[in-house]
Image: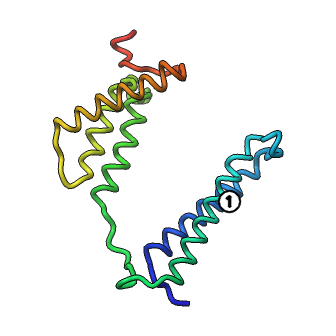
Amino acid sequence: MNIKSQKDFFSGLVYVVVGGAFAIGATNYNVGTGARMGPGYFPLLLGILLAIIGAFVMFKSLTVETQDGDKIGSWAWKPLFYIIAGNLLFGILLGGLPSIGLPAMGLIAAIFGTTLVVSKAGDTFNLKEVLILSAILSMGSYAAFVLLLKLQFPVWPTFITG
């Protein structure tokens, strides 16, 4: 068997592994039936669908010829670092770190901080564009999660709101 596209093969493999893991993990919950879905129904179907898509991509990588074999390049360490750091920062800013005495900074500060850090992952950085994007994301998130969905979590820093 000859792999004709390394990128497609390994991305399909990741889909199959992650989808299979979700499907297997979902069997620990009550799946139920189509008419009476249990908590494991959606993750099971999503895992199976993901694994099927991955299998299709892997099959395609073995049958469709690509130029130069579509080789996998080196790891992109800078984007990987900034994306992971941004996600960690979001959690820390949203909920705080009580173990070291850092209070919750709220949704707005978490979105601004995360957007600033994650935007450093790209090739270019324009502070004005990042701040505008942060403001739009903050307003949209506030409208969606706090106003429409009525979720209860800190919006502003605790030292401001009390």
Q: Given the image, on which type of amino acid does mark 1 rest? A: Ile
Check the image and name the residue furthest to the front.
64
Residue sitting at x 37%, y 30%: 93
In the image, residue 143 sits, relative to residue 79, either above or below, namely above
Check the image and name the residue furthest to the top.
162
- Residue placed most toward the observer, 72 or 104: 72
Horizontal and vertical percent for residue 67?
A: 36, 83
Horizontal and vertical percent for residue 72?
A: 38, 75
Question: What secondary structure is marked by label 1?
Answer: helix
In the image, residue 159 sits, relative to residue 123, either above or below, namely above
In the image, residue 16 sits, relative to residue 6, either above or below, namely above
Q: Which residue matches tag 1?
A: 48
Q: Is residue 130 left or right of residue 18?
A: left
Q: Residue 79's quadrant in the figure?
A: bottom left
Characterize the local packing of mark 1: few (<14), some (14-19) or many (20 or more) Cα atoms within 10 angstroms. Answer: many
Horizontal and vertical percent for residue 34?
A: 80, 45
